[in-house]
Amino acid sequence: MIRFANTYYLYLLLLIPLFVLAYIVMLRKRKRALDSFGETRLIEQLAPDVHRFRPIIKFGLFLMAFTAWIFVLARPQMGSKLQQVKRKGIELMICLDVSNSMLAQDYSPNRLEKAKQAVSRIIDKLQDDKVGLIVFAGEAYTQMPITTDFSSAKLFLSTINPGMVPSQGTAIGEAIGLAMNSFGPEGSASRAVIVITDGENHEDNAEEMAAKAKEKGIVVHTIGIGDPQGVPIPMGANGSFLKDNEGNVVVTKLDEETLKKVAAAGGGIYMRSANTSSGINALFNEIDKMQRADIESRVYSEYEEQFQWIAWIALILLMAEIYLLERKNKYLSKIKLFK
């Protein structure tokens, strides 16, 4: 199997017809100019050292050298063998709270952006693992199925916003349940769930769901985002805050007690997000203790570079074009192989 590493260089081949067309135009102009001096046969007799076909041969050598250099730049490669690569890791589902309370600005610029930064750091620490994203507020939705494509995970992470889930609330239990159903078959790899939320307006059976996850061998960790003292929730760009039905400003507080209970029921740990990465490092110390198993096997084809011999051909053609004279060589013309 042959492929090209830099296929975009092959577009330079479109220049060859243009070179040929320009050369034909040049030859015609040259012929008209010679015809204006007199009869062609007479001119050839006056200039016996001028070779009629050598300029065409030189142009042909130039075109072949140019074509060869294009293929050198495109880097042709040939598959030499197939190699099977196995990945050992864990499966990790991250559940991110996107309720309106995550817009509170006790973190800069707000809780949600702080949480997304924490998720990004978590993804950066993964190696041969799988990761998936779930967003939740009053309901839970899969933002990205579990995958080994960390670049796609970060791309999906960047698009997360509170408008993704229309119903308000903090359905931690539903998010954990959805995460449990997002993993591969049991026994394939160690599995963990990380819930990142402020824990406020918690209404469902999060502890019970975390306990069910633990029974299935899934560890549930929680990360708290927010200030336990409470801050108002900004609404819009006019500086106003969310108010209740009586016109009072709503204050959102981090519910650490709930998150600690959920983590304890799920056999995991609770940590509060801070301005440093020490909390994330502590969480990953726990994840590193988990047993890694074969989670994926891929077959790759190794390719060997083939441009070297084409480069030699291009160099020989170029040297031949340079040293081939348009005029006849007076010394070579005296050599008579056949008398």
Image (tube, rainbow, N blue to C red):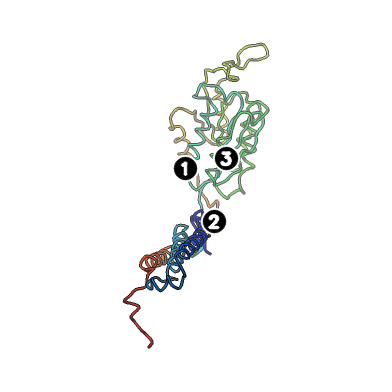
Which image quadrant is residue 220 in?
A: top right
Whole-percent x, y for residue 18 in the image:
52, 57
Categorize mark 2 by other alpha carbons within 10 Å: few (<14), some (14-19), many (20+): few
Mark 1 touches mark 3? (CB < 8 Å): no
Whole-percent x, y for residue 216 in the image:
61, 43
Whole-percent x, y for residue 323 in the image:
35, 67
Which image quadrant is residue 97 in?
A: top right
- Secondary structure beneath label 2: strand
Which label was assigned to residue 298?
2
- Residue found at the far bottom of this picture: 339
- Residue found at the far left of this picture: 331
Q: Residue at x 58, y 16 (%)?
A: 238
Q: Amino acid at mark 3?
A: Met
Q: Earlier in the sequence, mark 3 or mark 2?
A: 3
From the viewer's perspective, is the residue at label 3 or at label 2 nearer?
2
The answer, for residue 233, to whether it is visible in the render is no
Q: Amino acid at mark 1?
A: Asp
Q: Residues under labels 1 and 2: Cα distance? A: 24 Å
From the viewer's perspective, is the residue at label 1 or at label 3 nearer?
3
Q: Residue at x 50, y 36 (%)?
A: 120
Q: Amino acid at mark 2?
A: Arg
Q: Nearer the viewer, residue 205 or 127?
A: 127
Q: Nearer the viewer, residue 251 or 292?
A: 251
Which label was assigned to residue 288?
1
- Secondary structure beneath label 1: helix
Categorize mark 1 by other alpha carbons within 10 Å: few (<14), some (14-19), many (20+): few
- Secondary structure beneath label 3: strand
Mark 3 touches mark 2? (CB < 8 Å): no
**Mark 3, residue position:** 93
Q: Earlier in the sequence, mark 1 or mark 2?
A: 1
Q: Residue at x 58, y 43 (%)?
A: 217
